[in-house]
Amino acid sequence: MDFHTKPSSLSLILFTTLVIFVHAKTDSDITNLVYRGCAEQKFPNPSEVYTQNLNTLLSSLVSRSSQETFNTTTSGDEQTSITGLYQCRGDLTTPECYTCVSKIPDLAYKLCSKAVAARVQLSGCYLKYEVIGFSQVPETELLYKICGSTQVTGAAVFEQRRNTAFNMVTNGVKNSVELFYTGTYEHVYILGECEGDIASGNCGDCVKTATERAKNECDDSISAQIYLNKCFISYSYYPNGVPNPNSSLSSGAQGSIHRRQWQWQLE
């Protein structure tokens, strides 16, 4: 099967999202499943070649995660190659990164069996792969959101504080070599990160878009997580003061379900 088909050949991808609770960082928490996206199209026959390339790719990425928190690689020859990458959250150590990434291959096989493209997002890391020939999803495409179920009282004060925190994270990621930033401002804890292969200027633009989506999608929620294709942000508002930097994703609220469909197009 030729993956370089006409643009009208579309593969519909549904990101099925899960409700999760977020707590302080532990091994179990960083490996919680947040969402997964699987292309409906499966490996063409003979699928064994693609399966072997995927096995090699995933093994290589898992191995590298014990040494660095971001890596991208390709497996296979020109016609059957599969490219993929993983990204760990910037506050994870390399052992924690390995713990997180090593959980993904089994999930990818189970949830996206033989899909030509997939993305699995855990609380502390994500991994994605695609067969050669797939067009790229826009950098600022919304993949998933979690909005805290509690709305803030005294919205005007909250919005001013949150907006300042949003400006901090937008500037912070641009000025960080790791493209990662955490900080607090007036009871708001903010975290932002970009994929490791994005330019710093584009990272700032992506995070700024994520902050705007947080305002529009989650209104005055006490917490939110916004996952775009190339970046994500998380904030939590603590009226009585931020309790602990390690509980950066803690909101005391259940995330809301968000289902979104779009198409991945074969080039």
Image: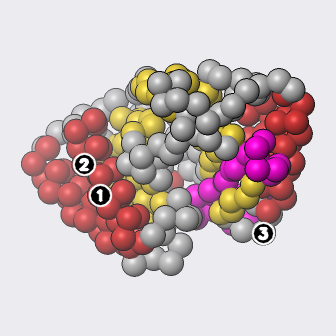
Please name the residue shown 36% across and 57% down the image. Answer: 206
Rendered view: 121 above or below 66: above
Of the numbered discs 3 and 1, the one sitting upstream in the chain is: 3
Foreground pick, 152 / 217: 217
Split into 4 quadrants, where in the image is the N terminus?
A: top right
| Amino acid of disc 2 | Glu
Please name the residue shown 42% across and 46% down the image. Answer: 138
Relative image position of residue 136 (x, y in whole percent): 50, 45
* Position of residue 30 in the picture relative to residue 219 (left or right): right
Q: Secondary structure at mark 1?
A: helix
Whether pointer 2 and pointer 1 mark residues with C-beta atoms closer than 8 Å, the reply is: yes
* Position of residue 149 in the picture relative to residue 23 (left or right): left
| Amino acid of disc 1 | Lys
Q: Quadrant of residue 258?
A: top left
- Tag of residue 208: 1
Relative image position of residue 176 (x, y in whole percent): 45, 76
- Tag of residue 67: 3
Split into 4 quadrants, where in the image is the C terminus?
A: top right
Whether pointer 2 and pointer 3 mark residues with C-beta atoms closer than 8 Å, the reply is: no
Q: Which residues are magenta?
A: 75-99
Rendered view: 177 above or below 153: below
Name the residue carrying label 2.
212
Q: Secondary structure at mark 2?
A: helix
* Position of residue 196 in the picture relative to residue 255 (left or right): right
Whether pointer 3 and pointer 1 mark residues with C-beta atoms closer than 8 Å, the reply is: no
